[in-house]
Image: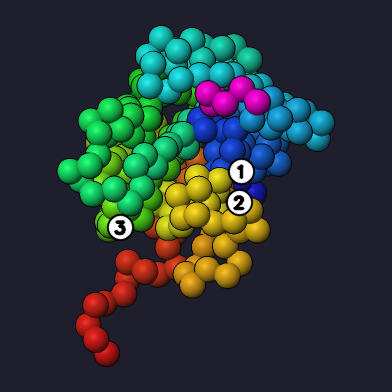
């Protein structure tokens, strides 16, 4: 399928590792011009160098997605570097306390998860919107989760934040429809990322021996490419669930 992404300016948060990095590389492979945003300066520099070595048009911009002044500055820098901002991909996220009962979760940890996972996408969209409004076939894709629908134990802040991301996507899709800015979300189950490995205590070798199915960041990135592409023009306010069919399963014991 021709995704019509060649030459488009794409802003990706969380681009230093995991799903964000995979998205940045996937867009670059389609000929897009990519702005990589993250707070991890070392990871950003590595991704930028690898992309540029391959001939891709890429620029790394350090940002704190929870700080409005930082986000505003980063979006301005990205727009200047790319020329246009045609798509925004919000991948930056943290898991927060993992395996903690709710009465042992510090307020600071709760606030940190909501700040990165919910306020971050809000701020990126807010400051990118003037650029998106002047773009042709603009699109926003938020990274939600299967945890937007179901809850795993010991992950109250993360589960709540991803539920909020899903509703943020729906609300934005309604509010921005008049501007022809589409907003969708990808909701994957467990993805083989550094964050997931750390949370689940997985060794560097990965999830090869896991008793559950795990997807790769590249597989998630392909869903993001489609939703960000002009070829998915009729798709708006949609949550693409990528979970090997788990949500479709009945609990009926048959």
Residue lying farthest front? 104
Residue lying farthest left? 103
Across and down, in percent, residue 31 comes to 70, 36
Q: Earlier in the sequence, mark 2 or mark 3?
A: 3
Q: Is residue 228 above or below residue 205?
A: above
The segment highlighted magenta reads 37-42
Q: Closer to the observer: label 2 or label 3? A: 3
Q: What's the distance in space between the residues labelled 1 and 2, CA to CA?
A: 5 Å
In-front residue for pair 30/78: 78
* Residue where numbered disc 1 is placed: 22
Q: Where's the N terminus, which quadrant? A: bottom right
* Residue where numbered disc 2 is placed: 218
Residue drawn at x 42%, y 38% as measured from the top left: 94
Q: In this view, does 208 lie above or below 219?
A: below
* Residue where numbered disc 3 is placed: 152
Q: What's the distance in space between the residues labelled 2 and 3, CA to CA?
A: 24 Å
Query: In terms of image quadrants, where is residue 168?
Result: top left
Across and down, in percent, residue 156 comes to 25, 47
User: How many residues crowd around disc 2 within 10 Å: few (fewer than 14), some, or many (20 or more)?
Assistant: some
Q: Earlier in the sequence, mark 1 or mark 2?
A: 1
User: How many residues crowd around disc 3 within 10 Å: few (fewer than 14), some, or many (20 or more)?
Assistant: few
Disc 1 element: helix
CB of mark 2 within 8 Å of CB of mark 3? Answer: no
Across and down, in percent, residue 95 comes to 39, 42
CB of mark 1 within 8 Å of CB of mark 2? Answer: yes
Disc 2 element: helix
């Amino acid at each position: 399928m021709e995704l019509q992404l060649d030459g488009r300016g794409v802003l990706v948060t969380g681009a230093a590792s995991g799903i964000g990095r995979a998205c940045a590389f996937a867009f670059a492979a389609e000929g897009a011009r990519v702005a990589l945003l993250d707070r991890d300066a070392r990871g950003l520099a590595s991704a930028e160098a690898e992309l540029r070595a391959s001939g891709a048009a890429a620029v790394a911009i350090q940002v704190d997605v929870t700080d409005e002044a930082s986000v505003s500055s980063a979006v301005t820098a990205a727009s200047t570097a790319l020329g246009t901002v045609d798509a925004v991909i919000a991948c930056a996220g943290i898991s927060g306390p993992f395996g903690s009962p709710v009465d042992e979760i510090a307020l600071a940890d709760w606030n940190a998860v909501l700040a990165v996972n919910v306020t971050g996408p809000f701020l990126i969209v807010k400051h990118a919107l003037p650029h998106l409004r002047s773009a042709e076939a603009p699109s926003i894709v938020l990274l939600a989760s299967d945890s937007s629908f179901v809850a795993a134990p010991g992950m109250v802040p993360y589960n709540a934040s991803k539920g909020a991301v899903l509703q943020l996507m729906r609300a934005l899709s309604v509010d921005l429809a008049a501007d022809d800015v589409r907003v969708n979300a990808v909701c994957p189950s467990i993805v083989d990322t550094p964050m997931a490995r750390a949370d689940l205590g997985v060794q560097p070798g990965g999830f090869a021996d896991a008793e559950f199915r795990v997807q790769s960041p590249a597989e998630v990135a392909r869903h993001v490419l489609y939703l960000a592409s002009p070829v998915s023009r009729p798709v708006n306010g949609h949550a693409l669930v990528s979970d090997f069919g788990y949500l479709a399963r009945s609990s009926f014991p048959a």
